[in-house]
Each structure stands twice: as C-alpha cells, then as structure tokens.
Image (cartoon, rainbow, N blue to C red):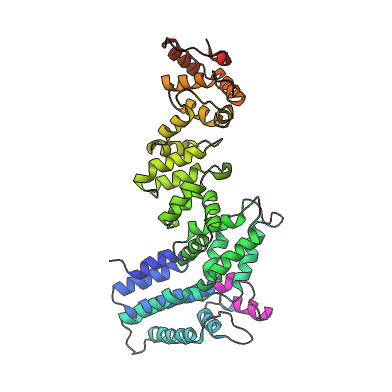
C-alpha cells in the first residue's frame, strides 16, 4: 500500500540528493526500522534546507561575510546538519528562515529525536514518531523560505526576460524550481501579482510564460494558488487561456464560466480562439447537450479565423462543420458581398478540406449571380482553383451534371 508521504514526495519534486534519503526512510518504515526511518527523514529535511540556503541570495539584515561563511559551513561534511539546524534558530542580527517560535521549537524537538536515533539512546522511537515528523514536514516545509527569497527570485525572473542579460534559449525551469524554497504559501498570491506587475508587457505577456511553466512543473498548492489567482479576474483568466489553451484542463473551471466563455467571449474582436474552443471540446468541458448551440454561437461570430489541422479533427468529431457549411454555403448563395468577402478564408478552408458536392457548387455560383460581386472571395477562388486542377475539374463535373446550373461569368476562371 502506498503511503501518503510517498505521494507528497512526488509532488515536491525533490532534488536527486534528497529523494534517495526519503526513499530509504520509507523502506525503513515499512520494515519497522523506525529509528532509521526517522533519521533518514530528518537528514532529508536538513538537506532541503541546506539546498535552499545555497541557492538563496543574501537575506536582509544578515552581514555578507556571515552569509558567505554559512554557505561554506553547510557544505562541510562533518558539521553541515548542525549549521543548517542553527540557521533555523537564528534571530540576531536577523532571521534566515522567518518561521514562528512554535515551529522553531518543533525543529528543536525533532533534532533531539534525531539524536536519539543517531546515538543509539534507549528512548523508544515508534511508527507514530515517524508519521508525526512526516506530518510536520507536509504542513510546514513550505514555510522554510529563506528571508528575502521572494524579492530575490522576482529579480531573477525579471533578468530572465532581459535579453541584455539572459539569452533567449536559456531555460526558465531552474527559476520555477526555486519558488517552493523562496516563497511561503501565504505569500504566493502576492508573488503572482508581483510577477504580473513586473513582467507584463503589451506585446510580450512574459508573466504568462512563468504561469505556464509553474503549471507544467507543480502539481501541489503552488499550482492551486496560481489557479485561484488567475480566477480572480475573468479578463486575466481568458488572456491566460488564450496564451496557453493546453492548460485549460487544469484550471477547474465552473460551468457558468465555461458557458459564458463560448457563448460570449470566444472569437470576439476577431480573436482566433480555435485552440481554446477545441480544448473545451476535447476535455469534455462543454455539456454534450450544449455542443450544437456552442458550435452555432462560434460559427455566427467567425470571420477570417480558420482552424488549424489539429483543431479541425476535434471540430469535425463534434459536428462543427455541418453548422459551418450552412453558414458559408447557404441556399441561394451569400447575398451580401461584404459578408462573402469576410468569410473568404473559411470558404477556402472548407473547399480545401472537404469534397465538393451539388450544394457547395450551387452556393458558390449563386453568390456570384447576386448584384454585387465579392471581389476578395473572387480573387481567392481564382488563385485557389488555378493551383488545384483536380478540384477545378470536379467543380465542372458537378455543374455539367446539372441541367439548371451554369458557372457565372464572374467565375469564368473555373471553367474548363
């Protein structure tokens, strides 16, 4: 049976030095070797704090020389864990880990229990000691953020997007990994707001790159807090979904928001939202009984936007193209030349991806027998059929098979 701590360890994405220590702790626990289990768990805890110290910049109020020496001391094989423990208790000249006095006392308690294990003392260490320590870690590890770490990480993120400092191909993940050690859980919402303030630019929403990387890397409260932050502002949430439609499945969206999204928001102001819409469909976020209505709402707002190859597959599976066909190939053709011009891209997209038939051919011909010709559509059809001789032949074959239909003069370039 898998223990709760095993799931927690996976969620924490611990380093290669820390994970083996907890693996040994779990093996020992399952073998009823509780002293060994507690010892390995404590060493894992101290190693996490050691890594956070090494990665962090100078905390406010700590002299540079003292900080440099601590970074050296925590890498000393003989005394590193003692120095890490002491760093949790320091309050003068300033704190390193801004934790409460209660948590400090708990760290002292677990250090003493570690000593009981390491020095073969007669104090009984049982399974409940190990489980209590694991519970302490699950509850409090996120609070052990080096003081000033949030501001330091924010500077690093800002520098990451400064091309005079950081090359374009440099990975952002090393900075994302630091969030857990640099930012306390109760400060995450503020941190995400600061990221938006510092990194948001009109043409480059760099804060969304950070948010997307966080959702890729974390599957714990760090991700949950980000999702909650995004949901506070509908405009922010929609902008993020448009930037990262593949993340839509992780956002736990309410049905009311989802309906408003496809009913009112998507494809507004000429936005190309096919990836967002197909993300909703693919992840079953639109109720089956609403899909036809959703397709109709989307089709009614379309103009120059056309689906990409992947979106086409999802749309076809959900009946989208039947509704689109009725819009762009109506009986009697498109009367308003402005509408026909606006739908040019969709008409070409449909003709390219589906077989011609009598209904399509009639609609195209009828559109060009109306009083005003749609010049944009005419030019695109001329170019299209010039490069698709098989389609051109098929178009003529259909017309020749219908006694009451002729290709209008405005489409003479289709004639063979």
Residue 53 on the magenta segment = yes
Residues shaded magenta: 52-72
For the point 54% across and 42% down, the residue is 272
Please give left or right for residue 135 compared with residue 83 in the image: left
Question: Seen from this angle, which residue lies furthest front?
Answer: 371
Q: Residue 372's x, y, as percent?
A: 59, 22
Residue in view at x 55 percent, y 50 percent: 243
Q: How many numbered circles does the render carry?
A: 0
**Left or right of 35 on screen, residue 78:** right
Say whether residue 326 is left or right of residue 305.
left
> Which one is in front, 342 or 56?
342
Is 237 on the left-hand or right-hand side of 358?
right
Tell which of 302 and 60 is nearer to you: 302
Residue 261 among magenta residues: no
Quarter of image, res 196? bottom right
| Position above or below: 313 against 415 | below
């Amino acid at each position: 049976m898998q223990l709760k701590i095993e799931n927690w360890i996976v969620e924490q994405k611990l380093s290669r030095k820390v994970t083996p220590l907890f693996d040994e702790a779990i093996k020992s626990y399952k073998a009823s070797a509780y002293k060994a289990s507690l010892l390995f768990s404590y060493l894992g805890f101290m190693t996490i704090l050691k890594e956070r110290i090494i990665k962090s910049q100078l905390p406010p109020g700590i002299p540079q020389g003292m900080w440099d020496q601590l970074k050296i001391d925590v890498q000393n094989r003989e005394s590193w864990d003692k120095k890490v423990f002491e760093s949790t208790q320091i309050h003068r000249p300033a704190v390193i880990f801004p934790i409460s006095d209660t948590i400090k006392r708990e760290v002292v308690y677990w250090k003493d229990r570690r000593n009981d294990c390491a020095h073969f003392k007669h104090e009984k260490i049982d399974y409940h000691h190990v489980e209590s320590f694991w519970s302490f870690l699950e509850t409090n590890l996120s609070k052990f953020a080096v003081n000033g770490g949030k501001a330091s990480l924010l500077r690093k993120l800002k520098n990451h997007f400064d091309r005079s400092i950081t090359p374009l191909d440099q990975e952002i993940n090393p900075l994302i990994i630091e969030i857990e050690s640099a930012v306390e859980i109760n400060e995450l919402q503020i941190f995400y707001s600061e990221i938006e303030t510092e990194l948001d630019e009109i043409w480059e929403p760099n804060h969304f790159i950070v948010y997307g990387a966080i959702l890729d890397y974390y599957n714990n409260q760090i991700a949950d807090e980000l999702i909650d932050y995004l949901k506070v502002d509908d405009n922010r949430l929609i902008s993020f979904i448009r930037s990262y439609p593949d993340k839509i499945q992780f956002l736990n969206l309410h049905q009311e928001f989802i309906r408003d999204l496809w009913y009112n928001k998507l494809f507004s102001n000429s936005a190309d939202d096919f990836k967002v819409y197909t993300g909703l469909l693919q992840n079953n976020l639109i109720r089956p009984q609403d899909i036809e209505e959703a397709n109709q709402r989307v089709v009614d707002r379309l103009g120059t936007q056309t689906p990409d190859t992947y979106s086409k597959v999802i749309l076809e599976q959900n009946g989208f193209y039947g509704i689109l066909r009725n819009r762009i190939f109506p009986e009697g053709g498109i009367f308003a030349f402005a509408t026909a011009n606006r739908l040019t891209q969709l008409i070409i997209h449909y003709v390219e991806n589906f077989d011609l038939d009598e209904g399509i051919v009639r609609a195209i011909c009828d559109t060009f027998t109306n009083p005003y010709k749609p010049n944009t559509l005419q030019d695109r059809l001329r170019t299209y059929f010039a490069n698709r001789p098989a389609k051109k032949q098929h178009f003529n074959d259909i017309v020749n098979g219908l006694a009451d239909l002729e290709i209008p003069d405005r489409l003479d370039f289709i004639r063979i």
